[in-house]
């Protein structure tokens, strides 16, 4: 009986398997794919690349940099390996993320060093704490021009003072406490959190700082401009400050679309000073906009943030050096790596220049694999040297008010397809589950698991050649 039942089920299972395979083949037939029945489930997305402009060396004008940007865009379309995301249309993504990007790029290292210092301080490793906190202090100083919040700087100086006080070095502790109170005169130490001797020393310094005659500073800023002093927003337009502590202060004035102004001022006790900021478009440039070297952490953090904001797998990096040589590389958000760079001299006619750029793009396009990760034999330890503030396209995305025209020349392209993309996620996942059920019959289940609808993260246009 058992043998008879078993043998009778074999044909049914075989028939069911045949039926399932036939049904699967029918679903995947050209007719059904053409009808869109399973095309969406089986479609494999290509990696995406964002093109966000070119960093100049100071010799190139904006027209030339934008022309090279267009050539890069066309080169990626010709290479046909990626979905290309041009810069125009990305303003809605960049402008709301500006503050977060600036903080991550210019203050990210300071935050990391501060956390390291706090860990050492809590473990009573005060020498190591001070070493890490001094690094944080230096990092904050290099990004003060973009500082809109003084809390990190105050916390760094306070922890330096606490570390010195804990080691009995009162003079050094007083100096750090003085910096805290210069920026945050209302700051106090909780007697329940800190030892009485620590609190007493802090209060002594506080009485000395607040006991001096305050200084007055008039910032004659344009109407609508935001005024920040020591990273703290203090007013809009013409602003008069009458209670500043004597000493060094940093002043930042910025206005959407008009640019920004930054300077340091030193105020004497009881003095009255006035400054008249002249706003200018400075973009990501700091000071004289120095060249960031190949090991620059700022460049690495900048392009990581650009990839996060654009939601693409790759970002094109392009820059000119002081000799006029042009270099191109890729950053991959998939593998968090930078590719080797290719370079060429572009001292040629515009037509020849564009052709050279497109050739470089086609060559560098093969440095990433089909998932958007940089191939292991093309990963570079260094990044492209560049001046951060000399990329007009990227500056406009972050600080501008109107889109930059980056229109492709030559043959017209198809209308761009608008997709909602989930940043840096794999393409559609297809699962086919075939099951055969027995006990007097057979049934076949086919289940297609398709990527769920992406979370709302904005849309942008992708021109698919």
Image (cartoon, helix red, strand yellow):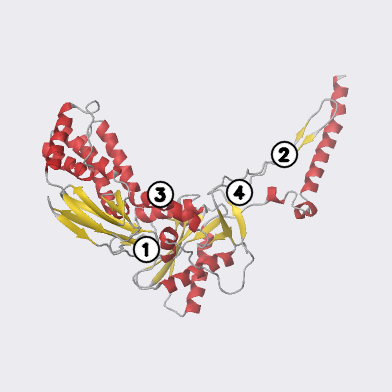
Name the front one of labels 3 and 2. 3
Q: Position of residue 306 (x, y in %)?
A: 45, 54
Label at residue 447: 2
Query: In terms of secondary structure, where does tag 4 sit?
Result: loop
Label 2 neighbourhood size at 10 Å, few (<14), some (14-19), many (20+)? few
Report, in whole angstroms, how far the alpha carbon at label 2 lies from the one at label 4. 18 Å
Label at residue 117: none
Q: Which residue bears the numbered disc 3?
A: 100
Q: Is residue 82 visible?
A: no
Q: Hey, which quadrant is residue 253 in on the image? A: bottom left
Label 4 neighbourhood size at 10 Å, few (<14), some (14-19), many (20+)? some
First in sequence: mark 4 vs mark 1: 1
Left or right: residue 27 compared with residue 328: right
Query: In terms of secondary structure, where does tag 2 sit?
Result: loop
Q: Is residue 185 above or below residue 143?
A: above
The residue under the point 26% across, 35% down is 120
Label at residue 258: 1
Report, in whole angstroms, how far the alpha carbon at label 3 lies from the one at label 4. 27 Å
Front residue of 306 and 48: 306
Q: Hey, which quadrant is residue 252 in on the image? A: bottom left
Query: Mark 1 and 3 residues: CB-CB less than 8 Å, in contact?
Result: no
The residue under the point 62% across, 68% down is 413
Q: Which residue bears the numbered disc 4?
A: 427
First in sequence: mark 2 vs mark 1: 1
Label 3 neighbourhood size at 10 Å, few (<14), some (14-19), many (20+)? few
The residue under the point 46% across, 80% down is 349
First in sequence: mark 1 vs mark 3: 3
């Amino acid at each position: 009986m058992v043998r008879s039942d078993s043998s009778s089920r074999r044909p049914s299972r075989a028939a069911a398997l045949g039926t399932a395979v036939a049904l699967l083949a029918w679903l995947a037939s050209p007719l059904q794919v053409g009808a869109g029945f399973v095309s969406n489930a089986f479609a494999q997305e290509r990696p995406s690349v964002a093109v966000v402009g070119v960093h100049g060396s100071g010799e190139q004008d904006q027209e030339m940099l934008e022309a090279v940007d267009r050539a890069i865009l066309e080169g990626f379309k010709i290479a046909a390996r990626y979905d290309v995301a041009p810069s125009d249309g990305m303003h809605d993504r960049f402008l709301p993320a500006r503050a977060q990007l600036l903080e991550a790029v210019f203050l990210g290292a300071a935050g990391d060093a501060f956390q390291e210092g706090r860990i050492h301080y809590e473990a009573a490793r005060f020498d190591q704490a001070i070493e890490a906190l001094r690094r944080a202090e230096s990092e904050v100083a290099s990004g003060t021009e973009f500082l809109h919040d003084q809390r990190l700087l105050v916390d760094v100086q306070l922890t330096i003072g606490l570390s010195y006080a804990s080691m009995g070095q009162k003079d050094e502790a007083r100096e750090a406490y003085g910096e805290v109170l210069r920026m945050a005169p209302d700051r106090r130490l909780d007697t329940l959190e800190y030892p009485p001797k620590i609190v007493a020393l802090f209060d002594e310094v506080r009485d000395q700082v607040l006991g001096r005659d305050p200084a007055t500073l008039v910032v004659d800023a344009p109407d609508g401009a935001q005024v920040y002093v020591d990273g703290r927003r203090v007013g809009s337009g013409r602003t008069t400050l009458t209670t500043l502590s004597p000493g060094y202060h940093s002043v930042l004035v910025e206005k959407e679309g008009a640019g920004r102004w930054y300077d340091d001022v030193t105020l004497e006790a009881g003095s009255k000073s006035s400054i008249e900021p002249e706003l200018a478009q400075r973009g990501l440039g700091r000071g004289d906009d120095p060249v960031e070297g190949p090991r620059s952490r700022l460049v690495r953090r900048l392009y990581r943030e650009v990839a996060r904001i654009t939601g693409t797998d790759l970002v094109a990096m392009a820059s000119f050096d002081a000799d006029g040589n042009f270099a191109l590389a890729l950053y991959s958000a998939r593998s968090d790596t930078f590719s080797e760079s290719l370079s060429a001299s572009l001292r040629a006619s515009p037509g020849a220049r564009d052709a050279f750029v497109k050739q470089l793009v086609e060559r560098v396009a093969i440095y990433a694999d089909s998932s958007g990760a940089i191939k292991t034999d093309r990963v570079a330890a260094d990044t492209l040297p560049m001046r951060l503030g000399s990329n007009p396209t990227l500056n406009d995305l972050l600080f501008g008010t109107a889109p930059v025209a980056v229109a492709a020349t030559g043959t017209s392209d198809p209308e761009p397809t608008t997709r909602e993309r989930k940043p840096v996620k794999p393409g559609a996942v297809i699962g086919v589950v075939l099951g055969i059920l027995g006990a007097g019959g057979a049934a076949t289940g086919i289940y297609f698991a398709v990527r769920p609808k992406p979370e709302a993260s904005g849309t942008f246009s992708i021109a698919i050649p």
